[in-house]
Image (cartoon, rainbow, N blue to C red):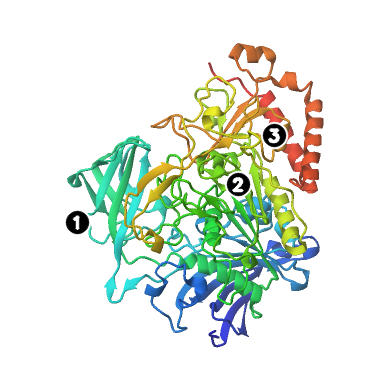
Amino acid sequence: MLVRRTTLLSLVAGGLLTCLAISVQARVLDLHIDERQVVAGGAPFGDRGAYERLRGTVTFSVDPANSANAAITDITLAPRGESGGVEAQATFMVLKPTDAERASGVGFFEVSNRGGKAALGYFNAAPFSTEPMATEDFGDGLLMRMGLTVIWVGWQFDVPGAADRLRLQVPVATDGDQAITGLVRSDWVVDGPATHLHLGHKGHTPYPVADPDDERNVLYERSGRDATRQVVPRNLWRFTAGEDAAAGSGLTNIAMEDGFRAGRIYELVYVSTNPALVGLGLAAVRDMMSYALHDESSPFAVSHGIAFGVSQTGRFLRQFLYQGFNRDESDRKVFDGMLIHTAGAGRGSFNHRFGQPSRDAHRFSAFFYPTDLYPFTSQPSRDAVTGRDEGLLDRLASAYRPKVMVTNTGYEYWGRAASLIHITPSGDRDVAPAPDERIYHLASGQHYVSRRPPDPDHRLLTADGWRGNPLDFLVNLRALLSRLVEWVRDDVAPPASRYPTIETDSLVRSDRLAFPDIPGITLPASPHLAYRADYGPDWGRGIVSKQPPWLGPPFQTLVPQVDGLGNETGGVRNVEIRVPLATYTPWSLREGLPVAGEMRDFTGQLLPLPGTSAEAAQRHDPRPSVEELYADRGVFTEAVRDAADQLVSDGFLLPEDRDRVMARNQGLWDLITQRQEPAP
């Protein structure tokens, strides 16, 4: 094992430049701290005292000959640095107690979603900030009051160029002296007039166009998700630098003089060159956590590690587990626990040639990328179509497996095929979680928590209600993180899994959904489907050669059954569902947009109950009215208090969050009972 020479760390503290010499191990060659500042004006976070923020860059060296790195696509085709390994450099940020003796010893590692920082927003009831410094950036300080050392590091090479985004600089693979070329695919759902389309997903840096005149560059157009592709004649479109591109940025767009047609899906396959070593992002996360755990010179040393990933980075953690990255180069376990949130059944483009990590897969966007990939369940489950019998954790020996909590909202069941993580691929029976795994379904939630009160501009066109679901599941995440820390550090078991199952008939085909006939509301025609896709003969080596992929038969997708109000059963039912004033759907349709029958990405609905029996009868609404359920506001408030107490007892709500839940639901009472009637 290579030991790097002593390195100087530049520390900026209190406006003074200080130097500290430390010895750094092979995985982390250099840790350079550009800034070290006390946050929140030095205010203490309970018994943990004040916190400080460290920010800088870290350089990694990855040994291609080490078995822990064998899964990294093209690792043997990457250039070596002076260390003898493949080197990459990332930006990082750490929040830690200024007094190490007051720290809990637990490192909370948020895998950054597209270069951002979400942990304080999710767990501290704080505004989302990429540069947390002021008191208000830390909300109620839960993570700090728990004494956690919060760690972020860049792992994604193609994040947009904003200075506050974390990123990883990686080398490109080459075949000796020859550049490597291959196929890249981009796609777009065009909802309005457009003459230019950016090649990167959500503004990310795209792969360069190798030759704009290459005959393998093909643009397709189709009218729906499953419609037949039509080739757009080459003389009708061109590569361009884009209307707003900076000088020298290259061909990053396609343009069509007559415009791209609204309501159509466009899909471009083009030839690119110099593939980035995307999979080094997995190693960067592994090695940053290992450094904090095992290197005596680490300025943010911890004794336990917990990973948190949300949406994209929840899928990243599933990939991390599947490809065995929870074992470091020195054969040590890395993360002791993981909280994987809203990943559905997905993994993603995190470790293949010309991979685009931002690309996901929804019912009506980002179609057919390598996201919904078998195996889905942690325990082995046989796919009768292909004959494979595998589990997500098969490549990790039991000694390296972390304790895992998986949380999904209703949206992930409809929009991200989440049922596949606990059923067979054919959907005929349930599959139990792994022994050290808990699965929690946050019933009727959408992918994120919408604002409350709802945006007036989001009133539904055909029904009484709003697009955007405000059901607050963040209180559950706060409680579950506390339970996860206890599980990892003290071996105190968390609540048993709660999710819908085939056995209890709480998980069903969408055509068996017992949704009430609410006036103006139409069910989605289908949930998102995951396909047995063929990406070409070299896919096993991480090379996609078939673009677009060939699609085989879909896996069976099931959704949670609902109660008489249309709210989901079979999971963690929050106060809003136990003491209802509305129907919360985790899905919504593309109302007011082209192809209106398909689902919107991420977004649900809030459908208030009728206020009175007369109103229900007038509207032909089969749901009970508010006045039938509750004699008055006091009766409602008492029911909310009882429901909150039960959630505390069950381990899904912190005692300190009772008041938050009470206030939120009382505000919902006022919103719904005092709302203006929709226009006729």
Count of numbered circles in the view: 3
**Pointer 2 local density, CA inside 10 Å: few below 14, some 14–19, many at least 20:** many
For residue 576, the mark is: 3
Image: 582 above or below 70: above
Rendering coords of residue 312 (x, y %): 52, 53
- Between the residue at mark 2 and the residue at mark 3, the CA separation in whole angstroms equals 29 Å
Q: Secondary structure at mark 3?
A: helix
Q: Where is residue 170, by image quadrant?
A: bottom left
Asked if residue 450 can be seen in this view, the reply is no
- Front position among marks 2 and 3: 2
Compare marks 1 and 2 and give the one earlier in the sequence.
1
Quadrant position of residue 442: top right
Q: CA distance from mark 1 to mark 2?
A: 50 Å
Question: The residue under label 2 is which amino acid type?
Answer: Val
Side (left or right) of 79 relative to 149:
left
Relative to 614, 86 lies left or right: left
Of the residues shown, which amino acid type is indicated by label 1? Asp
Residue hosting label 1: 213
Q: Residues within 10 Å of mark 3 (few under 14, many from 20)?
A: many
Asked if the residue at tag 3 contacts the one at tag 2, i.e. Cβ–Cβ closer than 8 Å, the answer is no
- Side (left or right) of 129 relative to 674: left
Ranked by sequence position, the earlier of labels 1 and 3 is: 1
- Indicate the amino acid at tag 3: Glu
User: Could you say where residue 150 lies in the image, as x and y percent from the top left?
Assistant: 65, 63
Q: Say whether disc 2 or disc 3 marks the residue closer to the N-terminus.
A: 2
How many other residues sit within 10 Å of disc 1, few (<14), some (14-19) or many (≥20)?
few
Residue 431, label in figure: 2
Return the mark for residue 73. none
Secondary structure, mark 2, is loop
